Image (tube, rainbow, N blue to C red):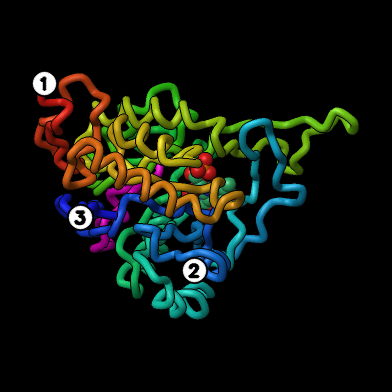
Amino acid sequence: MNGPNSAPLDTRVVIGSAVLRNPTIAASGCYNRGAEFGAIVDVSRYGAVTLKSITRHPRLGNDMPRIATTPAGMLNAIGLQGPGIEYFLTHEAPKLTSVPTAVIASVAGFTVDEFADVAAAMDGLPNVVAIELDVSCPNVDREGECFAAEATSLARVVEAVKSRVKLPVIPKLMPNVADLKPIARAAQEAGADAVSLINAVRGMVIDVVRARPMLANRSGGLTGPAIRPIAVHAIWEVAQTITIPIIGIGGVEKGSDALEFLFAGATAIGIGTANFRDPLVHVKVTEAIELEMQRRGASSVGQLTGLAHPGFAGKPGARGAPVATKETQA
Ligand SMILES: Cc1cc2nc3c(=O)[nH]c(=O)nc-3n(C[C@H](O)[C@H](O)[C@H](O)COP(=O)(O)O)c2cc1C
């Protein structure tokens, strides 16, 4: 969308060795391989599609009901339903060549070895450019504490996966912690190439007729616009802590939401729940980012990253090299 006299806009973003055509990424669990959406929208307008998290063994997921509506988002407790890595490799992985954009594989596990083994099996699959780690799962070796809740556990997972794969590794951090900063720092020090944040926020809805929790699992993960300010704050804090790229996720529904994430310090934008309501959301977000680049005279999208931080623009960094734009060069 360049004007007749404008310089070409570079919407590419870099996550480790992966170069995405634009900063929009379909979030894990909300897009599968994009095949269902491909019938109605142009999936190639996504910079990448993140697959539903895969575990070592097949999982039936939680009992129904698994989804409840809330005033500004949805609550889900799917329970990592999936076919397991063997079935995935035989039946699903060969179809990844038909995904018309980059693919980010997602791994979930309940032990460090499970993460490392499943990630190693994903490394080198066609079209797969990076591996995201859903570290919000309970660690069975540590009395069920989530890997992403504690810096040492998270670092062990990242180190183990990094030792087994060549692709960029992206742990996905969760907001239900007292302080995200040491956890993000541990991820970077363990060799993570980027971090995704945030995963769903824990919540509950009670059915007042039955006087019982709405979800069979009782609690679930809150997603959608209700969690966007939590995500913006998490991106802001973590951007001041680490230098690797941040994939900001949580409640993005329109262009200005994505700009908030970029200005808070995100390099790329994950979009989950909004796909269910508006399958064109990624196209609208990309176009809004391009318009903002033109408005600010930014030739590359990385120049928008971190703009809201006082004194941040212009600092060289691995996060997309934010540099001063016309408006910040006062
Ligand atoms: C139905 C559903 C299933 C999800 N499954 C996964 C999953 O398997 N792995 C994962 O890392 N995140 C999963 N997520 C979390 C999303 O990837 C994302 O982090 C979260 O929904 C916040 O973004 P949003 O507000 O744009 O939806 C799921 C979210 C939803 C709504």
Distance in Å between CA atoms under marks 3 and 2? 49 Å
Q: What numbered label is drawn on residue 330? A: 1
Residue drawn where x is 50% and y is 55% of the image: 280
Question: Which portion, as a residue range, is magenta?
Answer: 157-173
Q: Nearer the viewer, mark 3 or mark 1?
A: 3
| Res. 33 visible in picture | yes
Quadrant of the drawing holding the C terminus: top left
Amino acid carrying label 1: it is Ala
Q: Are marks 3 and 2 in contact (CB under 8 Å)?
A: no
Q: Earlier in the sequence, mark 1 or mark 2?
A: 2
Tell me if residue 170 comes above or below residue 173 in the rendering: below
Left or right relative to 72: residue 260: left
Q: What numbered label is drawn on residue 85? A: 2
Distance in Å between CA atoms under marks 1 and 2? 54 Å
Q: Quadrant of residue 178?
A: top left
Q: Is mark 1 within 8 Å of ligand 1?
A: no
Say if the magenta span includes residue 143: no
Q: For label 1, count other residues whose C-alpha is less than 10 Å away and answer few (under 14), some (14-19) or many (20+).
A: few
Q: Earlier in the sequence, mark 3 or mark 1?
A: 3
Q: What numbered label is drawn on residue 4? A: 3
Amino acid carrying label 3: it is Pro
Q: Earlier in the sequence, mark 3 or mark 2?
A: 3
Residue 8 in percent (x, y) is at 17, 55
Helix, strand or loop at mark 3:
loop
Across the whole image, how many numbered discs are drawn on residues?
3
Pick the residue in front: 46 or 250: 46
Q: Nearer the viewer, mark 1 or mark 2?
A: 1
Residue 11 in percent (x, y) is at 25, 52
